[in-house]
Amino acid sequence: MRIMDDKTIDVTSLALDGLMQKHRTISANIANADVAGYQRQDVSFEDQLSGILEKDYEHEAYKSANSKLSPIDPQTVMLSKEMSATTAAKALEAKQAYGSFKPMHLEDDAPAVSDNGNNVNVEKEMVELAKNTTKYTVLSETLSRKMAGLSEIIKGVQ
């Protein structure tokens, strides 16, 4: 197992960033529930995170499938070099996907739920806030355990 190459920390950090932005947006929706004409906002990042994970998975699968080549003859050596270039390109694409992660802010164009033209349903927002908080707590705990595990490994190496 490669400890420092584990994607758990990177992916969890991105997800926590997205959940924090979602939390702020939901809180703003609740705070503006009585403001005339306010349109509910939302944050979307799950599809983008899935895309990043998919690129990572493709890169790892490609690298794994092609690492079994043994250079025996000149053709195999050339094929191995071409695959190395493709593997490097896939690795760069996966790395760039992490850097380009940016949760999208969306405006909800649902019809108004009050006489003042506001479309915020406070009860629904409170449910979303609770779900979001639970997700954040679980991911924070996952990241904390991962860091504690790495800390134990480092202490054991000394």
Image (tube, rainbow, N blue to C red):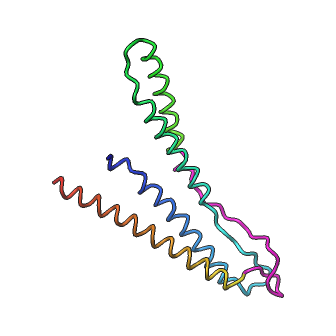
Vertical arrangement, residue 148 with respect to residue 60, above or below: below
119 in magenta: yes
Q: For the view shown, which residue lies furthest in the top direction?
A: 74
Please report the residue visible at 76 percent of the width from the left and 75 percent of the height from the top.
39
Please report the residue visible at 33 percent of the width from the left and 62 percent of the height from the top.
147
Pick whichever, 37 or 3, lies toward us.
3
Residue 93 quadrant:
top right
118 in magenta: yes
Vertical arrangement, residue 49 with respect to residue 129, above or below: above
Residue 102 quadrant:
bottom right
The quadrant in which the C terminus is found is bottom left
Provide residue 28's location: percent of width, then percent of height: 64, 78
In this rendering, position of residue 123 left or right of residue 136: right
In this rendering, position of residue 28 left or right of residue 69: right
In this rendering, position of residue 22 left or right of residue 76: right
Vertical arrangement, residue 144 with respect to residue 112, above or below: above
Please report the residue visible at 49 percent of the width from the left and 35 percent of the height from the top.
62
Please report the residue visible at 57 percent of the width from the left and 50 percent of the height from the top.
100
Dominant secondary structure of the residues highlighted in magenta in the image: loop
Provide residue 19's location: percent of width, then percent of height: 54, 68
Residue 105 quadrant:
bottom right
Pick whichever, 134 or 36, lies toward us.
134
- Span of residues in magenta: 96-120
Provide residue 36's location: percent of width, then percent of height: 79, 84
